[in-house]
Image: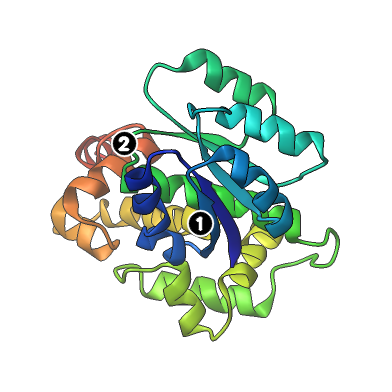
Amino acid sequence: MYRAYFVDDEPHALKRLTESHLLNDCGYQVIGSSTSPVLALDEIRKLNPDVVFTDLKMPDMSGVELMEKLRGKGAEYEFVIISAFGEYNAIRNFFQQKGFDYLLKPVLDDDLQTLLEKLSGRLASKRAAPGLIDSPSAELNSMIIYLKENLSAKHTLESLSKQFETNYTYICDLFASNLGTTFSSYLTKLRMEAAAEFLKDKSINVKEIAGLCGYEYLYFVKVFKKYYACSPTSYREGLE
């Protein structure tokens, strides 16, 4: 699992993030947290996490300053900033310092999941030894076949690791090294391609197609629009 450390001067916000089930579902272990960026500084150096999630505005030290201090000591962890809407200048400075991404407060589950899945791809790429895998492995092929045959099921890194009796990190490494993507992104690709095929059959309505592809109807429409830049209904009409 990937090791995550959290810093936020608001105890309730810190508790909500560190106790989110999405962390475990996406393959992350909380190895530490603090409401004080000053105290967090030394603890982060000792624990050496894969990623640091930090609030932007805090007393004594901002999240960007915390990142700069850690980077100044040669730290290679990824950083995610949590900020309020409108703090554009500080966020721009964060990206100039090569921060990974940011989350807006209040942090929504969908936003957190999307970020964690994208982050998993980055961390898997960093861990994977270049040149060790030149072609898709038999195990990865088995996983892909399993996903294709069970698109309507609720899949997570945790469920896939249990199905194939392996760990989250190994699965992330397989998808990153062989396919250059994350497990979640590849699953979305499979589902969207299947949805496009289902839409050719006009005897199946869009709500049924959503279920066949493992989505609630409204979320399916949202994902489909993002993937194909049009609604499922418009896509189907364009096939005529």
- According to the image, label 2 marks what residue? 106
Residue 55 in the image: above or below residue 212: above
Q: Secondary structure at mark 1?
A: helix
Could you tell me if residue 207 is visible in this image?
A: yes
Q: Is residue 141 above or below residue 117?
A: below
Task: Kindly tell me whether residue 180 is visible in this rendering.
Answer: no
Q: Quadrant of residue 140?
A: bottom right
Between discs 2 and 1, the one toward the N terminus: 2
Report the disc number at residue 186.
1
Q: Position of residue 67 (x, y in %)?
A: 66, 34
Q: 239 or 113: which is nearer to us?
A: 113
- Label 2 and label 1: CA atoms lie apart by 28 Å
Whether residues under marks 2 and 1 lie with C-beta atoms below 8 angstroms apart, the answer is no
Q: Residue at x 50, y 56 (%)?
A: 186
The picture places residue 213, in percent across and down from the top left corner, at 29, 61
Q: Residue at x 25, y 36 (%)?
A: 231
Where's residue 178, x and y in %? 69, 61
Quarter of the image that includes the C terminus: top left
Looking at the rendered image, the quarter that the N terminus falls into is bottom right
Q: Residue at x 53, y 39 (%)?
A: 54
Q: Which residue type does callout 2 highlight?
A: Pro
Residue 225 appears left or right of 190: left
Residue plotted at (45% across, 60% down): 23
